[in-house]
Amino acid sequence: MQDEDCVRIGKRLFTEGLVGGNFGNMSRREGDGFLITRTGSYLDDPGDLVLVPCEGEAPPGASSEYRVHQAVYCLTPHQAIVHAHPPHAVAASLACERIVPKDSEGEMLCPEIAVVGGAPGTQELADNVAAALKDAHLVIARGHGTFAAGKSLDQAYLYTSLAEYSCRVLLYAGLWGKGIL
């Protein structure tokens, strides 16, 4: 089944350069599981979503990052997740353990962004992201991308956009490498 919110948010992510090619994925809770984009799908035209149970293996075709989504839904009350690859946020994650936004929106909505480790698609990454999102809406997987979560795909998109904007501001202000990150 195609999801209109996924299509709309996917187009915004692609247009704004927060994902490229067929990178990234999205999901939202559905009953005792969640609907997630297919592995290899383009987020601006994701096609049919895959229903994944909250526990156990995912059916064929589910995004390779389903473990992260599964862990987040098991540990948190979040209703939707957006995983993107915003370039400035990914670059910042290579230089620090946490990011402290200095722009007004970043300070207000997400005063600190955790950076976690773990290889893409692994349970280690899933556990680290879920732990970080237990009390937050945004985390960056080092060298990989953002995982943003919230009550809707719109809210998760907002935090994804915020990560890129805040990291770009830090770069333009010359604050990278000065203990701010």
Image (tube, rainbow, N blue to C red):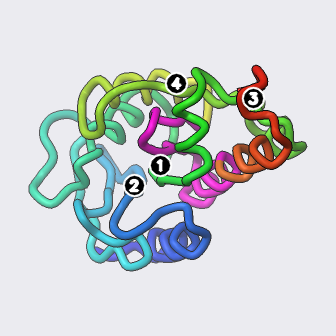
Nearer-N-terminus badge (2/1): 2
Label 2 crowd bin: few (<14), some (14–19), many (20+), radius 10 Å: many
Q: Which residue is drawn at 59% across and 38% down?
A: 138
> How many numbered callouts?
4
Q: Do the CB atoms of the residues marked 2 and 1 lie less than 8 Å apart?
A: yes
Q: What residue type is labelled 1?
A: Ile
The mark that comes first in sequence, 1 or 4, is 1
Quarter occupied by residue 50: bottom left
Mark in the foreground, 1 or 3: 3
Q: Which amino acid does label 2 sit on?
A: Ser
- Secondary structure under tag 2 reads strand
Residue 53 visible (yes or no):
yes
> Quadrant where the N terminus lies?
bottom left
Q: How crowded is mark 3: few (under 14 residues within 10 Å), some or many (20 or more)?
A: some
Foreground tag (3 vs 4)? 3
Which residue is disc 4 drawn over? 132
Real-space Cα distance between discs 3 and 4?
15 Å
Q: Earlier in the sequence, mark 1 or mark 3?
A: 1
Q: Mark 3 points at which residue?
A: 100
Q: Which residue position holds label 1? A: 81
Q: Does the magenta stretch include residue 82?
A: no
SS at badge 4: helix
Q: What element carries label 1?
A: strand
Q: Distance between the residues labelled 2 and 3?
A: 27 Å
Q: In this view, does 97 lie to the left or right of 162?
A: left
For image coordinates 15% across by 46% down, the residue present is: 58
The residue pinned by badge 2 equals 27
